[in-house]
Image (cartoon, helix red, strand yellow):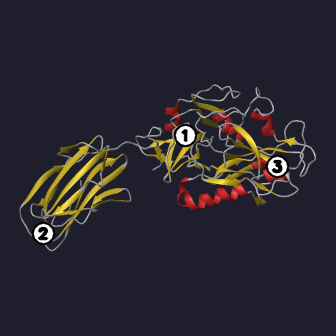
Amino acid sequence: MQFERIRKNHKRKIIIGGLILVCVISAITITTTRAKYKITQDIPLAKGTINYKLYDFKIMAMYKSEDKTNYTEINEMPTSGYLINEEKTYCTIDNKTQVKGKIKTVNGIHGLYNITKNDKCYLYFDKYVPPITIDNIITAASPKNTTPNFANAAESDEGVYKVSDGMYGGTSYYWRGAVTNNYVKFAGKCWRIVRINGDGSMRLIYDGTTCHTNGTKTTDSIAKTGAAYNISYDRSEYVGYTYTTGSQRTTSGSPSNLKTQNETWYSNNLASYASKIADGKYCNDRNIGTSYSWSSQTSSTFYYAGYDRSGAKNASSVSPTLSCPLGDVYTLKVGAITMDEVVMAGGKWRTANSSFYLYNGNFYWTMSPYNTSSVSQAGTFDVDPNGYLDWSRVSYNSGLRPVINLKPDTLFAAGGNGTQSNPYVVE
């Protein structure tokens, strides 16, 4: 408690101290005009007293709530565990005018400012509930230490699994099947959690302007339809997210059409939220499959390493990975999902699955190369409208479904549980 004595021809400032948030001191600062009256009283408040003039400061009523809905009148300011509700708190002047905007926070200090003679103030306090962290979300998901059978499509809610993260290091946690606890609202749009990366950042895939239930066929979750992966297709280089003629791989060079379209969408929709979006790692694995060799233009078909892992080569041998050749890792604000992530999420090579969370009834690209055929047609993995993993020539007009990563320290509003009706909401 801190106060100053009233002296002739001097103004006074009274600070009523109370611990509102852990390790943060809150205060109500009341500035009045010169002392003109002699009658004063003491009022207990926050385990202390203040001197005030009956005509200078009429009344302070205080209320608190445990649920931000039902408020109970209190006699003392809460000393901890509560925050001032800046929307509900207000003052009146001479019992007439309701004055809003007098409560604000400056440098972590809650203050009630510009109080004048004959004001009446009504303070509302809400119980403080800490925001949700990414670690909280992992804990709530109860991740499994086992490895699912990737040879089967995941049509039911299989939950969350742990896996070694070859790109980020550490452990990644990925959602699989018809899960219903991976909805996130961010930047006014809905997203689905693909996985928590090894560095603690959260990978999201665009789900549209609204959140959709599993099994919903909708173009709303496609950011752009009719988008080719690349305009040209007659060289193997065109499977690259970026490419240089004559080179098997490069993370510089010319951008693919998919990269250009992705980054245009990002600039138009997410640039103002860049402070919350991590520089994520994205894999464009251009390693060559077993027993094949790379060629820019070829008279015989060769396949990329993803062909071996995806089940396209052998339906009973499916082995997705989060590792990536060093020369194929892009560090970007926005990218696309990989074939491996689709398989981990529950997709299967040419086996329909309208139940898992990545289904939306449309074609959309991954950024994983598939092959270059004997007629020099470069191909990349995509997701089919039936919800299965397939491939298309890079010049095919498929869909764009952006992927971003939220920073590890991202906070979500208290109370969300990741469901469609109550998603995790980024603060």
User: What is the spatial separation of the Cα atoms under label 1 and label 3, in whole angstroms?
Assistant: 31 Å
Q: x%, y% of residue 251?
A: 76, 55
Q: Position of residue 387 (x, y in %)?
A: 65, 37
Q: Circles 1 and 3: CB distance less than 8 Å?
A: no
Query: Viewer-proximal residue, 10 or 164?
Result: 164
Amino acid at the residue labelled 1:
Thr
Q: Which mark sits nearer the N-terminus, 2 or 3?
A: 2
Question: Nearest the camera: 80 or 212?
Answer: 212
Q: Is residue 19 visible?
A: yes
- Please tell me the numbered disc located at residue 216: 1
- State the residue position of label 3: 378
Residue at the outermost bottom position: 9
User: Label for residue 35?
Assistant: 2
Tag 2: Cα neighbours inside 10 Å, few (<14), some, or many (≥20)?
some
The picture quadrant where one finds residue 308 is: top right
Marking on residue 380? none
Residue closest to the far right: 299
Q: Is residue 166 visible?
A: no
Query: Is residue 132 shown left or right of residue 298?
Result: left
- The 10 Å Cα crowd at callout 3, few under 14, some 14 to 19, many 20 or more, is many
Above/below status of 128 relative to 174: below
| Mark 1 neighbour density, 10 Å: few (under 14) some (14–19) many (20 or more) | some
Is residue 312 or residue 185 the one in the foreground? 312
Q: Is residue 424 left or right of residue 122?
A: right
Amino acid carrying mark 3 in the image = Ala
Q: Residue at x 32, y 59 (%)?
A: 104
Q: Position of residue 329 (x, y in %)?
A: 73, 49
Q: Nearer the viewer, mark 1 or mark 3?
A: 1
User: Which three-letter amino acid code belongs to the residue tagged 2?
Assistant: Ala
Report the number of discs.
3
Q: Quadrant of residue 382?
A: top right
